Amino acid sequence: MSQSVESKVVARIYGHGRGWAFSPIDFQDLGRVDMALMRLTENGRIRRVIRGIYDYPRFSDLLQQNLSPDIHQVAMAIARKFGWRIQPDGTSAMNLIGLTTQVPSQFMFTSDGPDRKYKIDKTSLEFRHTALKEIGFRIPESGIIVHALKVVGQDRISPETIDKIRSWLPEDKRSKVLKDTDRVTGWVFAAIQKICKESQHG
């Protein structure tokens, strides 16, 4: 029986792909999965990031080693675990997309949960309680893009900015993000239209 549960856990993890972060809450429909996660951690198939949060590590063929956890994935896993709604602040949104070359030591998310701070390797992940604005997005990528564009600013959005965000946003999510953001500020939505519609650029 436990082997059956473990195989279902593995199938779900592999289905999300490398980089996915999760907690036992993501498998609650399968019953108790603590032992399965412990075994998978011990045999190196998954990694314990912090207490109660794991990931399926991304692997670098160049470096021949696992990469650091995906901070956005870890943040979303924590949010799902505690039932929070979260949104990256503008600077963190830019870092998640790769619009800045600075390697951040801290990522900040606003949250409708309590103030919390975690240490992920050498990176600080902080959740700050606030009344969330523009939280009505159904897709996490929507909020990240909107916040990043606002930090960049209307007058500084270049074709390179559009290309960078487009390459970050998976193709299968572009039409969903376009629909998800149709009520945001006019110039922000105009930029998102360019990002999501291949024919308009490049």
Image (cartoon, rainbow, N blue to C red):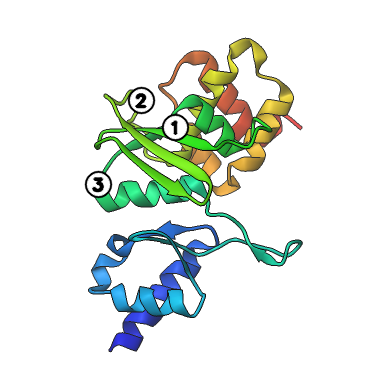
Q: Position of residue 134 (x, y in %)?
A: 36, 25
Q: Position of residue 177 (x, y in %)?
A: 48, 36
- For this orientation, the residue located farthest to the top is 155
Q: Please tell me whether mark 1 or mark 3 is closer to you in this view.
A: 3
Can residue 45 be seen from the camera position used here? Answer: yes
Say which amino acid is labelled 3: Gly
Residue 118 lies in what quarter of the image?
top left
Tag 1–tag 2 contact (CB < 8 Å): yes
**Disc 1 to disc 3, how far (Cα)?**
18 Å
Badge number at residue 143? 1
Say which amino acid is labelled 2: Glu
Q: Residue at x 55, y 48 (%)?
A: 172
Q: Nearer the viewer, residue 11 or 197?
A: 11
- The residue singled out by tag 2 in the image is 134
Say which amino acid is labelled 1: Gly
**Disc 2 to disc 3, how far (Cα)?**
18 Å
Q: Residue at x 64, y 10 (%)?
A: 155
Query: Is 102 placed left or right of 132 in the picture?
Result: right
- The residue singled out by tag 3 in the image is 83
Q: Secondary structure at mark 2?
A: loop
